[in-house]
Amino acid sequence: MKQTNTCILTSFLVILLVAYKTKATSQDDKEFLDAHNKARLRSSLPPLSYNQTLANIARKYASTRAQDCALKHSHGPYGENLFWGSADGMPKWTPKDAVYAWVKEHKYYDKAANSCVPGKKCGHYTQIMWRDTKRVGCALSYCNKKDTYVVCEYDPPGNIEGLSPFDKHDPFVYSNLHQNR
């Protein structure tokens, strides 16, 4: 019984720590979703829905980066965008700021070649624009005590090599993808 109580108390403390280090509000969730859907609407793509399971996964991963702010992917089964914003010169980064930073990569996406302009990155943008993605969940946290760290998870994932983000793909592509991850 004592061991069970200790386990419950430890779990509760971990949950509190994650909640403390990650800023999770329904207003943030709405801002993340609205920014994603505004970008998708401009490309005539269907809107995403916000998914709390994905947000919880994002929150858990963001909490693991609280000490180092490292832009290292979790390599989970979902698509993932990461953002780090320094507190220097910027009082507070918002969910919209992170999504817009990713969307700005559109200028580096060559639609005709279905690739990024050589020497540039555009994978955050193409993940947001992935037509088949239906759900998104995000977390905003603070790392190094003040810098902003954002994780967004996407289901189904995008950025499958050789496929255009703007096309509808056979669902088999995704079942095969999960087997390879």
Image: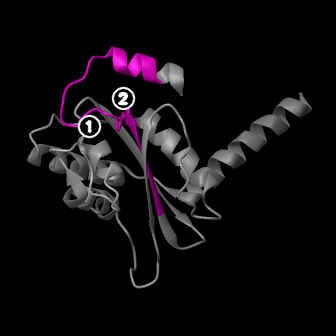
Q: Nearer the viewer, residue 167 or 6?
A: 167
Answer with the quarter of the image where residue 66 lies: bottom right
Name the kind of residue labelled 1 in the image.
Answer: Trp
Q: Under tag 1, what secondary structure?
A: loop
Q: Nearer the viewer, residue 70 or 20?
A: 70
Q: Is residue 153 magenta?
A: yes
Q: Which mark is residue 130?
A: 1
Q: Which mark is residue 46?
A: none
Asked if disc 2 and disc 1 are in contact, CB closer than 8 Å, the reply is: yes
**Residue occupying image coordinates x 35% and y 54%:** 28
Residue 44, percent across and down? 9, 39
Per the rendered image, the range of residues in magenta is: 149-177
Q: Under tag 2, what secondary structure?
A: loop
Where 87 sits versus 80, above or below? Answer: below
**Residue occupying image coordinates x 23% and y 42%:** 114
Horizontal side of residue 123 vs 145, given as left or right: left
> Gap in Å between the C-alphas at discs 2 and 1?
9 Å
Q: Is residue 101 magenta?
A: no
Q: Earlier in the sequence, mark 2 or mark 1?
A: 1
Name the kind of residue labelled 2 in the image.
Answer: Pro
Q: Nearer the viewer, residue 103 or 56?
A: 103
**Residue occupying image coordinates x 52% and y 58%:** 71
Which part of the image, by quadrant, shows the C terminus? Answer: top right
Q: Mark 2 — residue? A: 156
